[in-house]
Amino acid sequence: MTTARMNTGRMNTGRMTTGRMNTVQPTAMMSDRYQRAFTIAVIFLVAGWHLAGAGGQLVRDRPAFASFPFQALMWLVMALAITAGSALVLRGAPGWGPAWAVAVVALAASTASAAASPAGQMLAVNWAWGSAGWIGVLVLLRRRFAELACFLAAEAMATLGVQVWDGLSRTDLAGFLAVLAWSTGAQVAVAAGVRALDVAAGQAAAAVQREDAARERAATAEIIRAARHARWLALQESAVPLVAELAAGTADPGDGQVRIRCAVQAARLRRLLAEGDELSGSLVHELHASADVAERRGVAIEVETAGALPQVPGPARRVITDAAIAILTAARSQVRITLATVAAGIAVSFVADTGTVVRLPAAGEGVVIEQQQDGGMLWAEARWNSQ
């Protein structure tokens, strides 16, 4: 029964570890997934505008152009810029150099197309202005908003410069401002909307992560409580018969073996009360608690630490403290315990004047125990490796 309950505690601890590893939802990736979805939506928007909007206008106004092949070439250059920009943003937010290289290519193609448009009809047949602006939105989407504003302003000034070169009238200026407000307003609105959705996605991912963490903490607390209860029942099964024997008079308190049994049970009880799976330095705390009974017998005990000690899992700590209880119970006058950090875990060394060979508990839970007897002195080491 004792073994079954202890195994139940270990299984619960294993479930706790598995729960930490198998998170319900990889919340750390949620925001990135949403951002990627928004990016793909912008790519479809830009490509669709260039293909259907700009391409359709270019074909419709074909007779108005002095050189249609040149306009078609500029359209193709922008299509390549969209392809390159899409590849950049799908890998993540592009750096300043690559993003602006694509933006400048689009700006140059737009300006060249406007300059090659028939004078007096530039605004009516200029298909490139919108495409260049959308390319800027694509490659500068997740860079500073000021960069997108600078690009759109530069594009507007370049188009206005071409119009001034051709001869700018009040009607032309009014048309320019109308196109500027419609085209640039839509592009700024899309960029601002995507940024707002990015923020909302990040907040949603953070909220889900906090909710998962709260559920995990509650489940962990329940598992720890159940494991400690199982250990408490196991301790009762070994301590209650001893108390019953003492009460019935069948066990003699003057018998050395009975005193050893009492010391072991008292040390285990103090260790159970001292256990704290979520506290730093739990192993040191539990060793001190286990040593208290031996100190009451007049045994001089030293507990020393060397270096910053790692956190040792509860099952491994119990193997180490079981060995410590066996040594402390058998010690005659002195015990020295040293805890030291090793490459992949912790080593706990014991030196005690036991007089006789001490039978240490079996190793396990990643703990390896070695011992040597030299006359009346016992040397033992319990080493736990995290790997």
Image (spheres, rainbow, N blue to C red):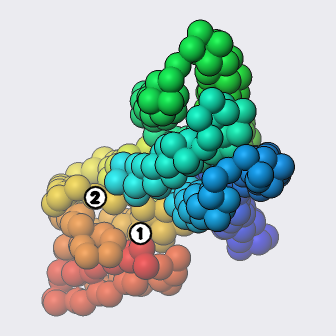
On the question of residue 368 being in view, the answer is yes
369, 179: nearer the viewer: 179
The residue that appears at 40% across and 84% down in the rendered structure is: 368
**Left or right: where 146 falls relative to 220:** left
The residue that appears at 67% across and 24% down in the rendered structure is: 179
How many marks the image carries: the answer is 2
Q: Which residue is mark 2?
A: 309
Q: Which residue is mark 1?
A: 320
**Left or right: where 361 falls relative to 48:** left
Q: Quadrant of the N terminus?
A: bottom right
Q: Nearer the viewer, mark 1 or mark 2?
A: 2
181, 378: nearer the viewer: 181
Q: Is residue 99 above or below residue 321?
A: above
The residue that appears at 44% across and 30% down in the rendered structure is: 165
Question: Which of pointers 1 and 2 lies earlier in the amino acid sequence?
Answer: 2
Residue 236 appears in which quarter of the rendering?
A: bottom right
Q: Is residue 364 above or below residue 142?
A: below
258, 76: nearer the viewer: 76
